[in-house]
Amino acid sequence: MKYLYSHYIILYICAMRKCSQFESLKIIDVIEEEYSCELHAQDHFEIIYIHYGCGEHVFNEVTIPYEKGDLFLLAPGDRHYFTVKTVTRFTYIKFTSSYFETYNRSYKSFSREITPTSIMEIQWLKEDKITVSEPCQTILKNIFENIILYNSTINVLRSSIVYYHILSIFGMIKEYIENRNIELKKKTPTNAHIAAYIQENISNRDCISINMIANNFNISPSYFSTYFKRNFEISYKEYIEKMQLQLIKRRLETGEIKLKEIADEFGFTDVSHLSKFFKRHEGINPSAYKNVGK
């Protein structure tokens, strides 16, 4: 009987967390020792704020640790759940695309191409957590506390104050992105675009550094390695080394290029550095490999 009661409570909480087709905005504030819902798909946009506690957020098979002050974004179709390690207070702001359309207000800090809902669709942003430093951290906390307070006393759907508070969250997210020198208008690259860039710049260590390639493709540098491995099923470092090794072997097989020239071409400090790299992968040094075919 106790199990059935707990089961119905969980189902009730999960149902309450879903925006019905008639609700364009819903605010939920909960404290949990265990996350009440299993893996589920979103049918609405959702901003999640962590007041305190720690654990993990599992988003579309990507696991992201969370702690106090973190912010997460979700869009329709995304699948996620939380694993709670210490008691956590969550605030959920759930809304549909019609919420901003209903108000029919212009937001001057956003363009037609860049809107709150378009920000919610940025893949790398959803697969990471948003963490801001002071004074933004305190401002963000106060925004959520104000929204929760209004939600307990008035109909938030009709509140201009709540609308502008939510808009200010997006303003902070927009600033967070811009501070990382990432252009909002750029689209998520394809694997072919990334592979072509690497191939063109494989001899330039600066161009294939994580910071450089991440910024070039509008992906957060802190998230790029996770993004790359998920899409290529190999780590970025392994991919680069594998491509370098293939090209070095081709140079050696010609028998016409000196080891120093190869070392310089691929950014190794000297021939010794090149030899250690090659032997680590092939089990023999490049000079021996060069003479194999003779």
Image (cartoon, rainbow, N blue to C red):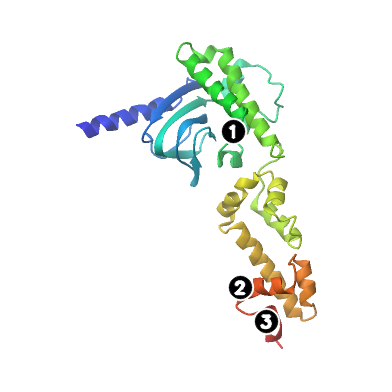
Q: Amino acid at mark 3?
A: Tyr
Which of the 4 image quadrants contains residue 242? Answer: bottom right
Identify whether 250 is placed above or below 138: below
First of labels 2, 1 by sequence position? 1
Q: Is residue 7 visible?
A: yes
Residue 71 falls left or right of residue 115: left
Circle 2 SS class: helix
Q: Is residue 20 visible?
A: no
Residue of label 2: 280
- Res 289 label: 3
Numbered disc in front, either 3 or 1: 3
Q: Using the numbered discs, state the Cα–Cα distance from disc 2 to disc 1 in whole angstroms.
A: 44 Å
Q: Residue 130's x, y, as percent?
A: 58, 36
Circle 1 SS class: loop
Numbered disc in front, either 2 or 1: 2
Q: Amino acid at mark 2?
A: Arg
Identify whether 181 is placed above or below 13: below
Q: Residue 112's x, y, as percent?
A: 71, 27
First of labels 3, 1 by sequence position? 1
Residue of label 1: 120
Circle 3 crowding by C-alpha within 10 Å: few under 14, some 14–19, many from 20: some
Residue visible at 69% across and 52% down?
Answer: 193
